[in-house]
Image (cartoon, grey):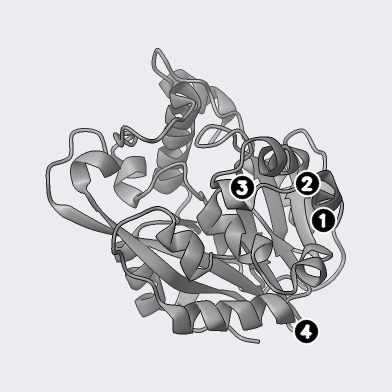
């Protein structure tokens, strides 16, 4: 799949997401050490939204949208992708929606045991588990954030109680990179602003040869990608042209790269299918 082909399919009002998968694959191999053995997933909580908010043109059918985090498993360690959030942060959004404290407790143990933690962006359900942790300093010392994530956590926090000071930000490992960053063997971060100014996708190349791309929140469900239709929730403030370009790129990826499995943060049906098939492990280790 070439960038030229991808650009040719862009329509008016979209910003081309000009990610070169061949470069990403090369970068997945530049750091020494064995590639990951697998990826485990966790559902910490959920929101239930009418489909008309989840995807443009949807109806009133309720859609369960899990709050997820992922664990990359190596022969001798783990790397966490995002940190979930505590019950108080979950409840700060209002309503009486599902929260799974036993799963969050498992996630906390996995965060404690991880060699490295990566936050894909500053939104509460991705970063809150670190920020509100009793052992914040210990976790932050092994948590990678981009310069853009750092800026958002200080200056435009997703929830007021998650706002961080410069002193707190200085506890993190801060990366300042333009487009791609190989953060661990087999794992590459991809700058993907749109859903938020600081979002990063995560490409994972396993020892088995399987490749996984965590598309984070470009779409809330796989249908956003399959139909190249954006979200329609009135409270979501996105760079819509950038998001639409990402959805079109992800659609091309889904159609043309059969070895790549796409993860979508809030798709409960997809999460269940991937765990049932064994692409995702059902339980966090640690």
* Residue 186 against residue 145 in the figure, above or below: below
From the top left corner, tell me how far across and down residue 92 is, in percent: 44, 56
Helix, strand or loop under label 3: loop
Q: Earlier in the sequence, mark 3 or mark 4?
A: 4
For label 2, the SS is: loop
**Which residue position holds label 4?**
76
Label 3 with label 4: CB-CB less than 8 Å: no
Report the Cα–Cα distance between label 1 and label 3. 14 Å
Q: CA distance from mark 1 to mark 4?
A: 23 Å
SS type, badge 4: loop
CA gap, disc 3 and disc 4 = 27 Å
The residue that disc 3 covers is: 121
Foreground: disc 4 or disc 2: 2
Mark closest to the chain's N terminus, 3 or 2: 3
Q: Identify which residue, 62 or 251, lies in the foreground.
A: 62
Which residue sits at x=44%, y=61%?
A: 90
Which residue is painted at 47% across and 69% down in the image?
87
CB under 8 Å between discs 1 and 2: no
**Which badge, 4 or 2, comes first in the chain's sequence?**
4
List the residue tagged with mark 1. 172
Residue 51 horizontal side relative to residue 96, left or right? left
- The alpha-carbon separation of the residues under discs 3 and 2 comes to 17 Å
Q: Earlier in the sequence, mark 1 or mark 2?
A: 2
Q: Which one is in front, 173 or 181?
A: 173
* Picture quadrant of residue 153: top right
Between 74 and 153, the one nearer to me in the picture:
153
Of callouts 1 and 4, which one flags the residue occurring earlier in the amino acid sequence? Answer: 4
Disc 4 versus disc 2: distance between alpha carbons?
Answer: 34 Å
């Amino acid at each position: 799949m070439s960038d030229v082909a991808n650009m040719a399919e862009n329509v008016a009002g979209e910003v081309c997401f000009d990610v070169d998968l061949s470069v990403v694959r090369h970068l997945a191999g530049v750091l020494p050490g064995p590639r990951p053995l697998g990826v485990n997933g966790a559902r910490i909580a959920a929101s239930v939204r009418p489909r008309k908010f989840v995807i443009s043109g949807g109806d009133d059918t309720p859609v369960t949208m899990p709050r997820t985090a992922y664990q990359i498993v190596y022969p001798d360690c783990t790397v966490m992708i995002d940190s979930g959030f505590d019950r108080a942060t979950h409840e700060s959004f209002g309503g009486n929606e599902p929260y799974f404290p036993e799963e969050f407790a498992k996630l906390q143990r996995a965060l404690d045991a991880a060699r490295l933690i990566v936050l894909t962006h500053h939104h509460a359900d991705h970063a809150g588990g670190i920020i509100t942790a009793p052992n914040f300093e210990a976790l932050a010392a092994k948590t990678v954030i981009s310069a853009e994530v750092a800026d958002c956590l200080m200056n435009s926090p997703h929830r007021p109680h998650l706002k961080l000071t410069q002193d707190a930000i200085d506890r993190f490992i801060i990366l300042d990179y333009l487009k791609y960053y190989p953060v661990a063997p087999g794992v590459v971060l991809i700058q993907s602003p749109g859903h938020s100014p600081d979002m990063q996708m995560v490409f994972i190349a396993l020892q088995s040869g399987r490749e996984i791309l965590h598309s984070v929140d470009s779409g809330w469900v796989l249908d956003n990608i399959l139909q190249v239709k954006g979200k329609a929730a009135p409270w979501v403030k996105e760079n819509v042209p950038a998001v639409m370009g990402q959805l079109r790129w992800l659609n091309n990826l889904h159609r043309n790269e059969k070895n790549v499995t796409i993860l979508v943060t809030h798709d409960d049906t997809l999460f269940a299918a991937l765990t049932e098939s064994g692409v995702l492990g059902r339980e966090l280790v640690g």
